[in-house]
Each structure stands twice: as C-alpha cells, then as structure tokens.
Image (cartoon, grey):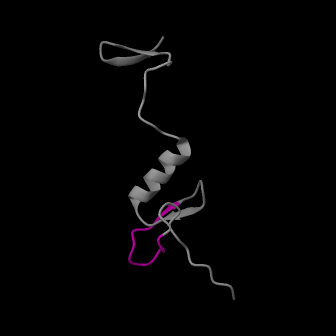
Amino acid sequence: MNEREIRCGRCNKPITNKTEVEYSQEYSEFYCKWDCAVEAFFDRARCVPFDFKDKDVEIKRGKFYWK
C-alpha cells in the first residue's frame, strides 16, 4: 500500500491529530490552521491592498462609489 502523508496546502507542514485541521471542499485541500487556509484563499483570489491609481472608484461621504 502506498501511503501519502497529508500536508498543509499552504505551509507544507504535516497534518496530524494535534493540529487544527481545516479542509477546503472547493479546492480539496487540507490546512494545518485557519490562518493558513485564509492566506491560501487570499493568494488564489489575488487579493491585495486597494490602490486607487487607474481605478474607476471614488470616495464620497466616506463610502466607495463607481465613477
């Protein structure tokens, strides 16, 4: 039987019964903790801090609006 150790999809640490285990049904991926899962999701979604340069967004009365 070929055993394959399950590792975190973000940091590559082994998943054990001592780690907090998160599982993404969307990506069929295990994560060793919630932070690793969130970071992986943000990476896949290419989330970055918002930069107003060349964007069609403006702020009026403290709220974001499309130009």
> Taking 23 as reference, is 26 above or below it?
above
Q: Which residue occupies the extreme right position in the image?
A: 1
Most extreme residue toward the front, as rendered?
Answer: 53
Locate residue 25: give its quadrant.
bottom right
| Position above or below: 19 against 53 | below
- Answer left or right for 21 relative to 1: left
The vertical placement of 49 against 54, above or below, is below
Q: Position of residue 22 (x, y in %)?
A: 46, 63
Please report the residue visible at 45 percent of the width from the left and 77 percent of the height from the top.
16
Q: Nearer the viewer, residue 21 or 4?
A: 4
Q: Is residue 16 magenta?
A: yes
Q: Main secondary structure of the magenta part?
A: loop
The boundaries of the magenta stretch are 13-23
Q: Furthest-left residue in view?
A: 61
Image position, residue 45 (x, y; %): 54, 42
> Which residue lies at the image location 38% right of the left edge and 77% below the top edge?
18
Quarter of the image containing the N terminus? bottom right
Q: Position of residue 42 (x, y in %)?
A: 48, 46
The mark tally for this picture is 0
* Residue 49 is one of the magenta-drawn residues: no
How far from the left and from the top, in percent, is residue 11?
47, 63
| Image position of 5 (left or right of 49) | right
Which residue lies at the image location 62% right of the left edge and 79% below the top edge?
4
Residue 29 vs 43, above or below: the answer is below
Point 63% across, 83% down: residue: 3
